[in-house]
Image (tube, rainbow, N blue to C red):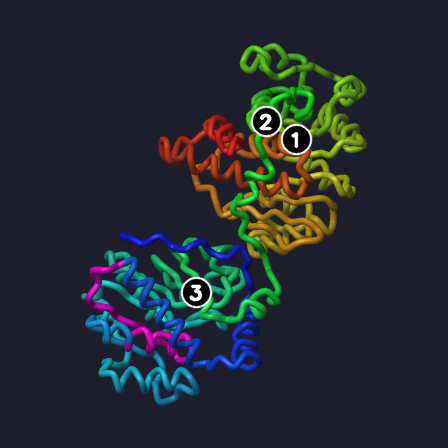
Amino acid sequence: MSTAHADPLPTALHTAAAVREMDRRSIEEHGIPGYTLMTRAGEASVAALLAHWPLATRISVVCGGGNNAGDGYVIARLLRASGRSVRVGTLAHPGRLAGDAAQAWRDAVAAGVSVATFEAAQLDDAHVIVDALLGTGLERAVTGDWAAAIDAVNAAHARGVAVLAVDIPSGLHADSGAVLGTAVTADLTVSFIGLKLGLFVGDGPGHSGAVVFADLGAPAAVRAAAPVAAERYTGADRGVLLAPRPRAAHKGDHGHVLVVGGDSGYAGAARMTGEAAARVGAGLVSVATRAAHAGAIAAARPELMIRGIEAPDELDPLLARASVLALGPGLGQHAWGRALFEYACGVAQPLVLDADALNLLAQTPRRRTDWVLTPHPGEAARLLGTTTAAIQADRLGSARALVARYGGVAVLKGAGSVVAQADAPPALILAGNPGMGSGGMGDVLTGTIAGLLAQGLAPAAAARLGAWLHATAGDLAAADGGQRGLLATDLLPHLRRLANP
C-alpha cells in the first residue's frame, strides 16, 4: 500500500525524442555529466521507493542493457548502502555495457551488490521489484527471454509483490502507450526530466500505476524549450473561469442554451443535456423536442422550457433568444432529425454537436470554427472515414485530424478524453472511471459544455473544463456508491458543486 503523496506533476507531456533532446542539451550545452543525471535518477527512484514502501527490506532489481539498466545499478547500490538486501538479475551481460551504464555497474559491484543472470526465482521473496529492463527507446515487440522476464515480474506482482518501474514500465511504448508484446504492470513509475506521453495515453495508465516525476536538475530553460506533445488538464483554471458572480447578476447574464433533440423514444437524452447545462450555471435552458415529449420533460424538470416542434422553422422563436445550441442528443437520423440538423448548422450561435448530429455531419461534412464536436471513438471513425481501432491506436492524432477536417474544437471521448484545437497541444482529461461507460453520459457532457459556453467561455476553454467537470463528477459519483450501476444523472449534483469552486 502506498503511503506517500506524490508532488504535483508537470502538465506538459513529451515524446521520448523530446526528452532525449532535453537530456542531450543538459549534458552537452549545460555541462551536467551524464553520470550525474543517472545518479540523480537513482536517488529519485530510491526516495520514491522508500516513501511508498518504507518497510521493504528485500528488493530485487531486474536490469537490461542500456541506460535504464544503469539507473537500476545505481538504485541497487544506494539501496544496499541504506542497509537493504538487494539482488540484481540481468538479461544483458554487464561487460557489454558502455559509458555511464558501465560505470554504474562497476560502482554497484564495488559496493558489494550481487549481480547474476536473471532467474524468475529471484523474485520469490522480494518485497519490491525494480523494473530497469527496457527504457523509452523500445520500438518493437518484446520477445524471448525479455518477454519471459516481464511475464515473471507480472506474475510476482499478481502474487502481491510491489513493482517500481524506472522511467517507464518495460514493454510500454513511450509515445503511444501501446503494449509492445507484453509490458510490466507497475504500482509506481518514476519518470525523469520530462513526463513521457505514453504513461498517460493508450495502455499507459493501466501499466504505470502512480507516477512520480523528477527533473534531475535539468535546466529550466532546456525543459521550457522542449516541444510539448500534449497537456494534462487538471482544472487548475476553474476558479478563474467560474469566478463568483456579482451580487446584482440575473439569469439573463448567464446565457441561454437551446437543446435540439429527442426524437420519438429519446426524450431522456434531451432532458439530461438540458439539465446538465442548467446545473453548471446556464441562466436559461430551452429544449426543442418532439411535441409528444414536451409534457413529460416539463413535469420531470420544470425549470427547463420545453417546446414541441415538428418543423425546422419552428425553431426561429427559440433561436432569437438562444446564445448556444446543443445539437444531437436523441436527434435520430430520420427525416425529423435530418431537417433540424441542416437548419441548426446554419445558425449564427456556437454549437455543441453530439450523437446523431455527429453521424449526420459525417454524411454531409462541413466546417465551422465555433463549434465543439464530442464524438466517442465509433463516431470519430465515421467522421474520419476509418475504423474505431485506428482511432484508438492514435487518439491524439485522431482528435487533431477531426479539427483539421471539421474545424472548431474536438473532444474525443473515452478513457483519457482528448480535447484538441488548432493552435495548441491537445489536452488530456485523466479523471473519469469505467463506470461512466453507461447510457446518457455523453448527453450530460454535451449539456455541461454548452452551459459553460453560454456563460461566456471560449469553445476550447468550455470543452476542456466541461470534460474535466464531467469526468471528475463521475469519479465523485463512483466514490459515493461504486462504479457498477453508475447513472448519468448521478453526476448532476456533483456537477453543481464542482461548478462552484
The one nearer the camera, 335 or 329, is 329
Residue 172 placed where, x, y %?
45, 64
Quarter-wise, where is residue 240 in the image? Answer: top right
Instruction: List the residue tagged with mark 1.
Output: 455
Q: In this view of the protein, which residue sits in the foreground, 82 or 204? A: 82
In what element is the residue under mark 1? Answer: loop
Work out whether residue 246 or residue 277 is closer to the camera in this orientation and state it: 246
What residue is pinned by disc 2?
281
477 sits left or right of 402 in the view: left
Is tag 3's residue or tag 1's residue first in the polypeptide sequence?
3
Name the spot of residue 209 as percent of width and height, x first: 38, 55
Q: CA distance from mark 3 to mark 2?
A: 39 Å
Find residue 214 and name its label. 3
Whole-number angstrom distance, CA of label 2 to CA of label 1: 7 Å
Task: Report x, y in % for residue 472.
Answer: 48, 39
Crowd rating for badge 3 (residues with CA inside 10 Å; few <14, some 14–19, many 20+): many
Query: Residue flagged by tag 3: what amino acid is it?
Result: Ala
Which of pointers 3 and 2 lies earlier in the amino acid sequence?
Answer: 3
Seen from the viewer's position, the closer of residues 316 and 310 is 316
CA–CA distance in space, label 3 to label 1: 39 Å
Q: Which mark is residue 192?
A: none
Give the side of residue 285 with respect to residue 480, left or right. Answer: right
Give amino acid for label 1.
Answer: Gln
Amino acid at dot 2: Gly
Determine crowd level at label 2: few under 14, some 14-19, many 20+ residues with C-alpha closer than 10 A: many
- The answer, for residue 90, to whether it is visible in the render is yes
Q: Are marks 2 and 1 in contact (CB under 8 Å)?
A: yes
The structure residue drawn at horizontal position 59% and vertical position 50%, both measured from the top left corner, is 427
Q: Which residues are magenta?
A: 53-77
Q: Secondary structure at mark 2?
A: loop
